[in-house]
Image: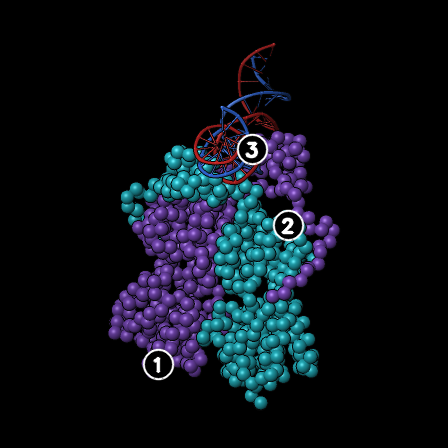
Chain colours: A purple, B cyan, C blue, D red
Amino acid sequence: MQEKPAQRPGGDGGQRSERRPTMADVAARAGVSRALVSLVFRNAPGASEQTRERVFQVAEEIGYRPDSAARLLASSRTKVLGVTITLRHPFHAEIVERIYPVAEELGYEILLSAVAPTHSEHRAIDALLDHRCEGVILLAEVDEHYLTTVGKKVPAVAVSTRATGAGVDLVHSAEAKGVRQALDHLITLGHKKIVHIDGGDGAGSTERRRAYRAAMRKHNLAECARVIPGDHTEQAGVRGAELMLSEGELPTAVLASNDRCALGLLDALRRAGVRVPDDASVVGYDDSHVATLSYIDLTTVHQDVEGIAQRAVRAVVERIEEPGSDPREFVLEPSLVVRGTTAPPRSV
Amino acid sequence: MQEKPAQRPGGDGGQRSERRPTMADVAARAGVSRALVSLVFRNAPGASEQTRERVFQVAEEIGYRPDSAARLLASSRTKVLGVTITLRHPFHAEIVERIYPVAEELGYEILLSAVAPTHSEHRAIDALLDHRCEGVILLAEVDEHYLTTVGKKVPAVAVSTRATGAGVDLVHSAEAKGVRQALDHLITLGHKKIVHIDGGDGAGSTERRRAYRAAMRKHNLAECARVIPGDHTEQAGVRGAELMLSEGELPTAVLASNDRCALGLLDALRRAGVRVPDDASVVGYDDSHVATLSYIDLTTVHQDVEGIAQRAVRAVVERIEEPGSDPREFVLEPSLVVRGTTAPPRSV
DNA sequence: ACTGGGTACTAGAGCGCGCTAGTAGAGCGC
DNA sequence: GCGCTCTACTAGCGCGCTCTAGTACCCAGT
């Protein structure tokens, strides 16, 4: 790596302003008390419209911004919500995008903490707690034991988990219903040999697997049912495809554990000369951003991201603002989105 | 959506502990002064090994954790670094994953703030500043004007930008070198008709576009040079492919703006029956996670993610710990990773 | 015995804010 | 004149921590 000096900034030469202005500075310059400034910034009654404007104007002039840390320390209320995410999971990104506006509407700020290889769920959550979040929304998976512990310290809501024993609010899709819709669609098209590549122990996988088996049974296709172990990554799709291809006879349709898995599957099939949907149909799960892309055009089970975000935020906020109620479970309706990767099987 | 009561947690019934323990609680229980506890937790000298252990033990017993907000308020040093990210950009996720361990090693904590449709760069940065970050690492793009403003308030480093006038540290790849390597590779294979789908005004695009033109000229292929306008999304790749296909005669090789663009391109080409790399070669840029997947196996320009993360963190930290030096620009070496999407052209 | 210099610890003043309790003054009825 | 209420503002404590300037004590050395 090479290092070279960059151009000097013009004008003031990049001098860091010596000290961040505080309320006292604003108060002094506006000729009022510190308390009055506090009042104004909290939007509390008790200041004349005139003074209010004056304070805001002075604040603007000297570049004052209230210090979250201090505010946070002084008030019991911090109005901060913590959110844990798994960076690699696009689904989490989409939920977070929807969380921001809802939180803002309710007057809460969002603090993010990522789960990464060197940054465990525990550390991510602890970081949030240390910053005095009033509540947490857990997108990243957590073991039930720790979830219980967290739930005792602070209002928490876990997304896409079924840890009903942890005593925290739960938000998730009706997985079984989604799977059922997907299978009904495929079976209506005439498919019988429908394989499921599952998501291992990932979020919602158990429910989806179970629902797959139940639906196949219901349609008297129990003997055609087959679950190939996988996970929620593209690799799982590729491995699933390779396994099926090596066995010579392909199923006419595959229900993937999620969209990422479906993508891997799609690509591996196409590489092998299998045309989708002509030779085989593929259904994903999540309806994540990529599924909607024209070149992928994946038939998939849509998760109500907007609803999940809404419910998650509202649940924590409600619990923060009036604690004591029993833990609740919010179940959102999934819906099948039929796109270009499903069609009737050949022989029909 | 349907709501149902979840199971009540066992034992203590999910009672929120009334008050979070403080230093004073630890001090009282351990029979020492508050200051001593502070000492111990800051790992400062001046406490006997015996007392130190005792304090830690008591803290553990009553579940004490130092309060970041208070600590942050009291000390001039907060040891917190802010990072802005664009949620949709996997490349950012990969950098953040590498940032955590480096920051930890240097004793800093990381606070994340996302740029989303309803959460602008400005708001993301402001949120970080309000939480008293000592420095910020900006992965999400910012206009030079605001970058300058931020740089005056706090040590900042911008990743993949060339805003040399903003007076902040800059970290980026030697884009030109990466492009040159890619083109050298293609030309050595025998390609002449090499098209570039560019990244519009996205990070690094101008440099890549310029380098592409320069390299074509150097190899006396200026008359074959062609830039198709695009951006950093899969869509750009698809549109580029459609455009080229509609014109009847395909180039023998395409340099995409980044991996996402290459992916769109790849898929659109394959759909149209164009075999890669037999009928056309494709090169991406970033070497992001997906490129390495076996079913994509994309030849691409590797960006030194580890190096970028390392330099970015070290740069802010150095500037925090000894301010006053001139803004620097760190340039990291890219390297071409040859995988399965490039081969000699047909006619050779 | 008196200093000197450690080590182990403590007192107490902030950090920037929120918030309760209070005051000063204006307006009003009697 | 008096009390009363209402608006517009202020004093000052405390949130949980850091950090400077101490104090108390012990063990040399003279």
Residue beneath label 2, please? Answer: B323
Quadrant location of the N terminus of chain A in the rendered image: bottom right
Residue at 54 percent of width and 60 percent of height: B309
| Callouts 2 and 1 on one subunit | no
Question: Amino acid under label 3?
Answer: Pro
Q: Quadrant of residue A152?
A: top left
Q: Does residue C18 appear to the left or right of B328 in the view shown?
A: left
* Residue corresponding to mark 3: A45
Label 1 belongs to which residue? A246
Q: Nearer the viewer, mark 3 or mark 2?
A: 2
**Label 3, label 2: how many angstroms apart (C-alpha)?**
43 Å
Alpha-carbon neighbours of circle 1 within 10 Å: few (<14), some, or many (≥20)? Answer: few
Residue at 66% across / 68% down in the picture? Answer: B206
How far from the left and from the top, in percent, is residue B262? Answer: 54, 73
Mark 3 falls within which chain?
A: A
Disc 3 and disc 2 on one polypeptide chain: no
Residue A118, above or below A321: below
Residue contact at pointers 1 and 3, CB within 8 angstroms: no
Q: Label 1 sits on what residue type?
A: Ser
Q: Amino acid at mark 2?
A: Pro
SS category of the residue bearing label 2: loop
In the image shown, does B26 or A274 lie closer to the viewer? B26
Confirm whether residue B161 shows in the render: no
Tell me the residue at 45%/75% (across/down).
Answer: B294
The outermost residue toward the bottom is: B347
Does dot 3 land on a helix, a strand or a loop? loop
Measure how far apart labels 1 and 3 are at the Cα level: 74 Å
Q: At numbered mark 1, what does the secondary structure look like: helix, strand or loop?
A: helix
Quadrant of the snapshot with the C terminus of chain A:
bottom left
**CA–CA distance in space, label 2 to label 1:** 62 Å
Side (left or right) of B29 relative to A293: left
Can residue A242 be spotted in the picture? yes
